Every structure is written in C-alpha cells, then in structure tokens.
Image (cartoon, rainbow, N blue to C red):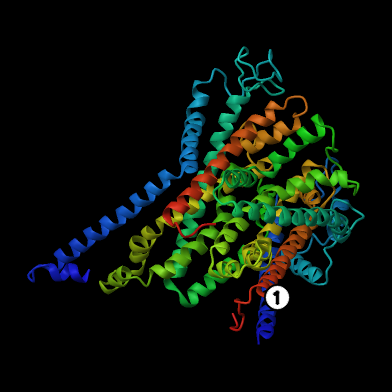
C-alpha cells in the first residue's frame, strides 16, 4: 500500500488513492478464490462427488415430475414386487404397491431440503453470534462463550428427541430444532476467525474512518469469513441430513404421507426379510449423498486452507 | 507446580459442571411439562377422583415452580423419583437395570474402535498415498457417512438372515448377541479415529525428531512405537470425549434395532409413553455421563501432553 501511494503523483486526491487501493484489494480477493477453485478442481474425489450431487439434485427435483407414478399411488397388481424393468417399477414396490424409485426421489427432496434449510438456520445464528462475540471481545465475549460452553455440554440428541415428542412431528420444528443445535460449532469457528480479523489493517482503517461497529461486522468481518463458513456449511449439511434421518428412523421425524430417506430406511428395515429392495435403495441414496457431501467439504477445506487438514 | 496446575484446573472444571447440569435439568424439566397429554392418559378414562389422587401422589397438583425445586432437591440427593409408567418401579431401578447393558455395549465398542481405528490409521499413514492408503481411507469415509441405522439392518440382513451365523437381536449377555451391536456402534468411531490417526501420524513422521531417531539407527519398530505413536495419539485422545457422546447417541438406535433392553431403549419407550420422570432421569444421567467422561479425557490429555499447562486459572 505504501509503495503504491508513493508512486502516485502528489496531486492525486485521497479518494483516488482509496479507490485504487480498493480495486487492488478486490483483485487480490478474487485471485484467492480462483486459486482455491483451481485447487478444488484438481481434487478428483471432490469433483466426482460434486457431479454426482448435481445429478442427484436434478433427479430429486425433476424425477417425480416425469415418473409415471405418483409417490402415493398404490399399484395393487404389483405389491412387494422386486425391481424389474417389465413392471416399470425399476426399484420395485413396497408392501402396498408404492413405487420405491418415486418414493426415494420424493424422500430425497425432504432430506435435502431439511439439510439445506437447517444448515442455513444454524449458519445465520452461528455467524452472527460468533462475529459479535469475537468482535466486541472482553466481557461480552467471555459471557457469550461461556454460554456456548454450557450449551455445548448438553446431550443434544436427547433434547431434540424430547422436543419432537413434546411438540409432535412437524417439519418446521425439525428445521428449527436441528438448526438450533448446529450453530454452536459455527459460532466458535467464526469467533476465532473474527478475533484475528479485527486486528487487521483494513478493519482498523474502517474504524478510523468512523464506520459503525455494525457496519464493520456486516461489511468487513463477515465477507472475510466466507471461506471458512462455506467449508463448514458443506460439512454441516450431511450432519443435518443424518440427524433428520435419525429422527425419522425413530419415528419422530417427518410424517406420512411425507417421507424422507430416514423414514424410508425405517420402513424398509421392517420388511427387509421379504423385500430387501425397500431398504437397499433408499439406504444407498442416503449413503451416497452423505459420502459425496463429506468429500466435497474435505476438498473445499483443502482448497481454501491447504494447511488445515484433518 | 504442574500437578498443582492440573489440580486447580480439575477443581474449576468440576465447579463448571454445576451450571451445565442446571441448564440441562431446567430445559428438560420444563420441556416435558409443557407437553400436551399427561402420563395418566390411557385408553380407559380414570374417574376424576382417582386421577386427582394419582396427581397428588406424584405432586403433579403443585405449582410448576414448586415441582421444579422439589425435583432439583431430589436429584441432588441422587433420587430420580418413581417411574410414571412402570408403576411399582423407581427411575433409579430402571436406570440401573439398563445401564450395565448399555455400558457393556458402549465400552466394548469403544475398545474395538480405539484399537481397530489406530491400527488402520497407522497402516494407512505408513503407506501414504499408496493404493492401499486410498482404499483404506475410502472405506473409512464410508464408515463415517453410512449411518448406524443403515449399517445395522444391512448387517442383520447379511450375517443373520442370509448367513445365519449370528442372532439378529435380543440380549442374554452371550458374546454372539453382542457382536453385531458392538460392531455397528463402533464402525463410525473406527472410521473417525482411523482418519485422525492417519493425519497426525503423517505429520509426526515428517518431524525432525523422528528423522533424528532414524538417523541414530534405531530399529523402525522402536521409532514407530516409542517415538511416533504417543504424540500421534493426542488428537485421538481428545476425540474420545465426542466419541463417547456419539456412542451414547448411537446406542439409542442400535438398542432399538437389535432389541436390547438398555438405557437407550428405555429412553425411547419413555418418550413414547410420556413417562416424565424416566425420560428426565435418563437425560440427566446421560448428560452427567458425557460431562464426566469429557472431564476424564481432558485430564488424560493433560497427563499425556507435557506441553499443556494449567498454571493460569481460567
């Protein structure tokens, strides 16, 4: 920055210098992302996983629309029929003749939706909390983090189970409950990053210019957290999907006629002796999704921060 | 000085338990009390007098706050109260009935996970970037990604129903009935520990003092077992706390699938029956177990890693 300013003609206004500095910073910011993107593309596992997830997303979104059956259509001629091309039920049917392929795709909509929405909920809470705590520091920070420590030690799965039992099975509640559980890690990570960010020159400069605390957090701190947040988000999505399917498996998650992978696996496990395909297909979809998300998250972590590996 | 530091740290941590437990009990207590439907809602409608008597018996007619403080007092004295559903049994009795089963399962799973995970991780680290490394770590990722409740039915299907080698469920303290649930519980933890061990082992093997040890001409076995393994295990030790929590949570599903009369089964049953006291008791018990085990892991870590100092009071 210093050399840049010195090279400029002496009559350049302050605004010009600022604009130039901003442009320069912008460029550097972009190249970091491009760098990370190139590193990510080199990671074959992550790229393949990304492609599979894209296919999965398309299948889940459009599959049920083009399928010849509705998810709740009961084909009385083919109950508990094994997978076959002739009947048109590629993945077979369950005990009441519902098509497993269509049910799996529809269940995938719910599972992925829960994964995404609950992750966003936890993201919103966690980033705000962590950024505020780290930025203000001092007593605020200590109190806020002590609260996180206390909540962190709670056996959450059990509280979520309680919550579902008490308030009944409700999809909105699932979003809120899972999101409310998952923000703690996010808050801790963001706080740590904020602590180091708030002492950087550009934040100091902003403060010197009289920018308000809120604006600094919103405009300067949070955008710089994006990398960490994105990595963590990708790793949170499979966790959330897992929690939802865990609840659904116990019969506490989504309710009929809605379905999710967890609920389908639970149904399939009931009939697995006579109709193993009702278990295997939803289980495979769930597993592939979790597998891919984990690989994408790992790849992104390596790409954005090559030093910080598990 | 160091001993003193650890001691002071331990005291602080034990005192730190109190607010956590208080928050836990409070949340769980009020959550259950706002639930619609009482413990005595059953198919046959009870006459109001009997219902009133029952409620008086269990102090349900008192104001909520008074019940709350009564419960806190009870817990401090180690009494979880009577079960609402199993009418002639106390929650303590039920917990002590389920706990040995769950603890045996969890303990065996932990042992298996620890040894298998470290073995796999070290093996992969020694052959870093080989085909073997990639395939082992690919399988480990699978172990992390596939949920317990998918593994369990698949294992039952393959080994019990088709193979017929092992019983599909139930519990009688025989090893045959323990194999499948223990393996199911341990698999994700094995996978995680393997990944952790591999990562830290690779890092340690690249460090200067390992090079020195090798340069001294020490046999490879000694270098690995004496010099490399201990520091490489530190991340694994600190993972033991979360692993315990994972095992306890996993046991809920595993016990349900394999039809095992452990704490997890009681918990789910209790939640379905609205057995307030049982559910509360188990949540508090689990909370305490997780916190205490985390604490032990913490101390173990401090003891293993001489760099950790607890000289400053937190």
What percent of the width, then of the height, locates residue B28? 70, 59
Residue furthest out toward the bottom: B1
Give the left or right position of residue A10, taking residue B241 as reference.
left
**Image quadrant occupied by the C terminus of chain A:** bottom right
Q: Is residue A94 above or below residue B299?
A: above
Q: Nearer the viewer, residue B83 or B114?
A: B114
- Residue of label 1: B14
Q: Secondary structure at mark 1?
A: helix
Can you tell which quarter of the image residue B293 is in? bottom right
**Image quadrant occupied by the N terminus of chain A:** bottom left
Total tally of numbered discs in the picture: 1
For image coordinates 66% across by 41% down, the residue present is: A248
What percent of the width, then of the height, locates residue B61? 79, 60
Q: Nearer the viewer, residue A289 or B136?
A: B136
Give me the chain letter of mark 1: B
Can you tell which quarter of the image residue A255 is in? top right
Inspect this view and state whether residue A173 appears. no
Q: Is residue A100 above or below residue B30?
A: above
Give the left or right position of residue B35, taking residue B101 as reference.
left
What percent of the width, then of the height, locates residue A183? 54, 57
Q: Is residue B143 above or below residue B239?
A: above
Q: Nearer the viewer, residue B163 or B61?
A: B163
What percent of the width, then of the height, locates residue A104? 60, 30
Q: Is residue A127 above or below residue B255?
A: below
Inspect this view and state whether residue B72 appears. yes
Give the left or right position of residue B264, taking residue A46 as reference.
right
Q: Nearer the viewer, residue B294 or A257?
A: B294
For image coordinates 78% across by 58% down, the residue present is: B282
Mark 1 Cα within 10 Å, few/some/many (few <14, many 20+)?
A: few
């Amino acid at each position: 920055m210093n050399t840049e300013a010195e090279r400029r003609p002496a009559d350049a206004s302050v605004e010009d210098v600022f604009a130039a500095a901003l442009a320069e910073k912008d460029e550097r910011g972009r190249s970091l992302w491009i760098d990370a993107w190139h590193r990510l593309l080199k990671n074959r596992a992550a790229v393949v996983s990304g492609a599979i997830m894209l296919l999965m997303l398309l299948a889940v979104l459009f599959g049920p629309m083009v399928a010849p059956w509705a998810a709740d259509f009961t084909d009385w001629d083919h109950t508990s029929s094994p997978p076959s091309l002739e009947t048109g039920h590629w993945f077979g049917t369950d005990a009441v003749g519902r098509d497993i392929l269509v049910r799996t795709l529809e269940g995938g909509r719910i599972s992925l939706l829960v994964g995404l929405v609950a992750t966003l909920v936890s993201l919103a809470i966690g980033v705000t909390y962590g950024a505020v705590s780290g930025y203000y520091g001092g007593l605020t920070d200590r109190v806020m983090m002590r609260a996180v420590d206390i909540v962190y030690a709670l056996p959450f799965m059990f509280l979520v189970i309680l919550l579902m039992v008490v308030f009944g099975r409700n999809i909105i509640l699932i979003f809120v409950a899972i999101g409310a559980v998952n923000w703690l890690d996010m808050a801790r990570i963001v706080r740590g990053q904020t602590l180091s960010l708030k002492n950087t020159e550009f934040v100091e400069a902003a403060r010197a210019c009289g920018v308000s605390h809120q604006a600094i957090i919103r405009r300067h701190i949070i955008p710089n957290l994006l990398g960490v947040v994105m990595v963590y988000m990708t790793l949170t999505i499979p966790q959330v999907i897992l929690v939802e399917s865990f609840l659904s498996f116990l019969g506490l998650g989504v309710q009929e006629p809605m379905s999710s992978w967890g609920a389908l696996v639970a149904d399939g496990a009931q009939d697995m002796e006579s109709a193993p395909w009702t278990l295997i297909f939803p289980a495979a979809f769930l597993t592939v999704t979790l597998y891919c998300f984990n690989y994408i998250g790992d790849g992104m972590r390596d790409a954005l921060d090559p030093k910080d590996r598990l | 000085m160091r001993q003193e530091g650890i001691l002071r740290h331990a005291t602080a941590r034990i005192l730190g338990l109190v607010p956590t437990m208080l928050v836990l009990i409070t949340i769980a207590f009020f959550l259950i009390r706002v639930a619609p439907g009482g413990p005595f809602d059953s198919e046959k409608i009870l006459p109001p007098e009997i219902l009133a008597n029952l409620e008086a018996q269990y102090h349900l007619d008192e104001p909520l706050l008074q019940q709350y403080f009564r419960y806190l007092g009870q817990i401090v004295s180690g009494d979880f109260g009577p079960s609402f559903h199993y009418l002639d049994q106390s929650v303590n009795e039920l917990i002590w009935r389920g706990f040995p089963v769950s603890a045996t399962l969890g303990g065996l799973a932990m042992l298996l996970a620890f040894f298998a995970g470290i073995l796999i991780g070290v093996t992969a680290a020694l052959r870093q970037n080989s085909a073997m490394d990639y395939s082992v770590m690919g399988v480990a990722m699978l172990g992390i990604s596939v949920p317990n409740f998918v593994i369990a039915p698949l294992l039952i299907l393959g080994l019990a129903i088709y193979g017929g080698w092992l019983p599909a469920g139930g519990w009688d303290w025989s090893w045959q009935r323990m194999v499948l649930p223990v393996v199911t519980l341990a698999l994700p933890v094995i996978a995680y520990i393997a990944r952790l061990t591999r990562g830290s082992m690779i890092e340690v093997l690249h460090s200067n003092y390992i090079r020195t040890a090798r340069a001294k001409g020490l046999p490879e076995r000694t270098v690995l077992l004496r010099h490399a393994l201990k520091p490489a295990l530190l991340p694994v030790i600190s993972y033991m706390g979360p692993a315990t929590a994972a095992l306890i949570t996993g046991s809920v599903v595993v016990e349900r699938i394999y039809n095992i009369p452990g704490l997890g089964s009681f918990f789910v049953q209790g939640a379905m029956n609205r057995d307030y006291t049982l559910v509360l008791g188990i949540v508090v018990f689990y909370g305490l177990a997780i916190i205490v085990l985390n604490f032990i892991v913490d101390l173990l870590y401090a003891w293993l890693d001489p760099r950790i100092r607890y000289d400053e009071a937190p």
